[in-house]
Every structure is written in C-alpha cells, then in structure tokens.
Image (cartoon, grey):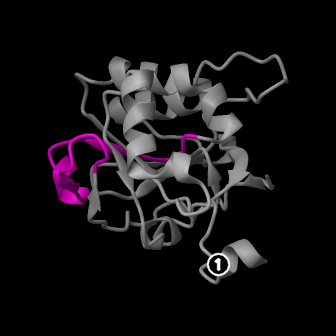
Amino acid sequence: MVLTPSTMLQLGTTAPDFQLPDAVSDRTLSLASFASKKGLLVMFICQHCPFVQHIGQQLASLGKDYADSELGIVAISANDADKYPDDAPDGLKKMAVDGGFTFPICYDESQETAKAYTAACTPDFFLFDDRRRLVYRGQLDDSRPGNDRPANGRDLRAAIDLLLADQEIDPNAQKPSIGCNIKWKPGNEPDYFKN
C-alpha cells in the first residue's frame, strides 16, 4: 500500500465523459445518465482498500441520504483486477450489495476514466455542478483508519449541501483525500502518479 493524496484537480474543470458498466445492473453508464441531476458526485473507490472499508457505512449513508435529491452519485473502481481480484466486477457487486449501496459502482477496466479525472487514491471524490464544472474535490472528512475521528462525511456533505442550495463552495476549505494508491496496470501509470 502506498499512502497517496488526491491530485486536487483544478476547480472549474469539466467532468470527463465515460462509458462504463455498472457492476450491479450491467447497464452502461455515462455523464448523460445523470443529465437530469443538478449535481454529480464521482467517487473512486474499491473493495479491498482499508481506507474505503473504513468509510463504507458513510458511503452507504450518502447514497441513501441524497437518493431523493438533485444529486447524482456514481462510484468507479479502476484497480488492476488481475492483481487485485477483489476489485473485479464480481467483487464490486458484492461490495455494493453487502454495503447497501444505492448508487451504481462501475468498473474502469482500461483505467482511462481514472486518468481523465486524475484520480490518484481510493477514496477520491469529485463534485460537479449543473454545468458539470468541478466545484469540490478531496476528502470525505478528517477520519482515517486508526485516528479515532468520526467518519461523518462532514467536508463532502457540506459541499454537496451548498451546491444543492445554489451557494458558493469555498475553494480554500478543500483538503486532499488520502488513501491507497490506485493499482495501475503495469506500464499504465499516468504521469501525475509517477511524479
């Protein structure tokens, strides 16, 4: 495990499109799948990462708490499933079912979507407005495995609530997420990961 922070993609960046299969429904999803939503939360997660496991209940709560809101949510896993078979589609489906996730969890086999978002770690969060411009990126909250701080989603939830209320999200109050590095396929590591 390599402890890795978010790249903190530049705010205002347009959400890259994707065409990815949902591990639960087998439907192919894209940005257009969420076109009716005022905001879109894109989360890079995986099954085996202890940082993701630590916040699993909070991820499920996020999905349930915003299910009837104007927020679309999609999770994406991009880990090399050859080396980390728990992160293959079957493992992601089990994670979603066992965890009570109400949002889709897609598998990015080519890892091109993760690269397009400059995702670096699991978990990594990207929140976009109605024009699909990035308004928040970084951490869920200050909780990490072993630091005894509550996993309550404070930072991300505050940003979501401001977005849905048409209020400004402070760019200076955004901290990088920290977690396991995305498990890139051999020779597929992006430049931003190598540096």
Position of the C terminus by quadrant = bottom right
Amino acid type shown at disc 1: Pro
The reply to whether residue 183 is visible in this rendering is yes
Q: What residue is rendered at 66% in x and 27% in y?
A: 54
Q: Residue at x 25, y 41 (%)?
A: 38
Rendered position, 84 above or below 145: below
> Measured from the top left, where is residue 133 in percent x and y?
38, 58
What residue would you read off at disc 1? 186
Q: Is residue 7 left or right of residue 4?
A: left
Residue 195 in the magenta stretch? The answer is no
Q: Measured along the vertical axis of the image, is residue 159 above or below residue 22?
A: above
Which stretch is magenta? 22-47
**Residue 124 appears left or right of 29:** right
Q: Residue at x 34, y 32 (%)?
A: 164
Secondary structure category for the residue under label 1: loop
Place residue 65 in its image quadrant.
top left
Q: Nearer the viewer, residue 167 or 116?
A: 116
Circle 1 packing at 10 Å, graded few (<14), some (14-19), many (20+), is few
